[in-house]
Amino acid sequence: MRYRALGNTGLSVSEIGLGGEWLERHNTEEVCKIVRYCDEKGINILDCWMSEPNVRSNIGKAIAGRRKRWIIQGHLGSTWQNGQYVKTRDMEKAKAAFSDLLERMGTDYIDLGMIHFVDEEKEFHAIMDGEFYAYAESLKEKGTIRHIGMSTHNPAVAKLAALSGKIEMILFSVNPAFDMLPAKENLDEYFEATTYSNEGIGGIAPERAELYHICEERGVGITVMKGYAGGRLFDARTSPFGVALTPVQCLHYALTRPAVASVMVGYDSIDHVDAALAYETATEEEKDYATVLAGAPAHAYSGQCTYCGHCAPCPAGIDIAMVNKLYDLASMHKDVPASLKEHYRNLSANGGDCASCGGCERRCPFGVHVIEKMANAEKLLG
């Protein structure tokens, strides 16, 4: 298992994580089997947004005696009312639900206290300026939560969170299908087939690309939900691209986004865990989402760098994907930060070393004008 820094939190998380949602369907024995298998395989981060009492208790039993081994994302505002899940901003109910989470999971602290499911900009401002964020801050001051995070599916909200200076990490939905679409306040629209039916959809939506770079620049770590788009990407009939991707390809896509530290994968069985863990030993060919998407009958990423690495190797030793990341980030600024220029100049080779041989462009699945981008990077950052 490989591990990554989660932004500036100081936490090192497994790049394959455990998303707990599917565990609601299982009894104590089955939950313990899946969670402990994840532990054995090196997975060390789990997300529990679910408010249903039994699944919380079952996860608590599964991690008993191993609590310190786990980095837990626990949510503030996810409650169980009248036998069903309810998202709430009612402080009394939110506090009771969080206390219940601690008790059932057998712990006196949560590593990542997630302000739960904020998809509207108006709601974001109300939370940050009101008693809900103040409550999260008080929990951090007492050590009951170690870091304050936020979960959202909306890149506009995620950007506000990343720029706030108050949110340390974000749980965000990342996959190649969602990345094509502009900011929406209704998650359900991302799953509707009609959303992808318009001609001309293609490439990463600018606000999503910007979000990833802002998070990387500011040290706001990203953990990923919906990495498989609810399984839609596994079937050509339901994939918006008209082709199927594998779990390994979906994971590689998410893990090549700037600032992404871990993908929270939902597991219904040990086989599902193994399907995700296959990423750790996969070949470059098995990880290759780029060739598949470039050859898709619909909505490819023509002309856009997705940092897939197909351009390598460069005879001049340039890490082309890294130079493109720095250039894309620098392009967002009116005045390029000195830190970005320093990072660029400290590369063992950069855009100024490009020999214009064109090998990278012949290998790029998306037809990116790499030579031009290297020259632009040198002009902007060199």
Image (tube, rainbow, N blue to C red):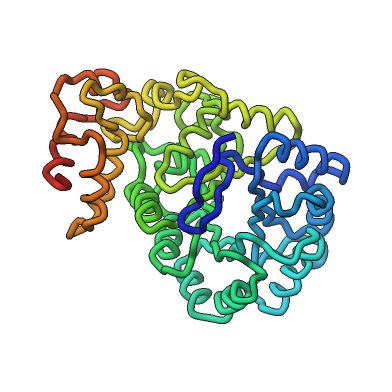
Seen in the picture, residue 2 relative to 367 is either above or below; the reply is: below
User: Residue drawn 71% across and 74% down?
Assistant: 95
Q: Is residue 327 visible?
A: no
On screen, residue 147 above or below 348: below
In percent of width and height, residue 355 lies at 13, 24
Query: Residue 31, position in %: x, y?
Result: 81, 43
Q: Is residue 308 left or right of residue 11?
A: left
Residue at position x 23%, y 58% from top?
A: 337
Foreground pick, 373 / 177: 373
Q: Is residue 147 left or right of residue 178?
A: right
Instruction: Return the x and y of residue 27 as percentages of the image width and height.
Output: 87, 44
Give the total of numbered labels.
Answer: 0
Residue 39, placed above or below residue 287: below
Q: Quadrant of the N terminus?
A: top right
Quarter of the figure that contains the C terminus? top left
Would residue 338 be visible to someone looking at this image?
Answer: yes
| Relative to 101, 119 lies left or right | left
Using the image as rendered, state which of residue 194 and residue 293 is in the foreground.
293
Foreground of the two, 66 or 79: 66
Q: Residue at x 21, y 50 (%)?
A: 341
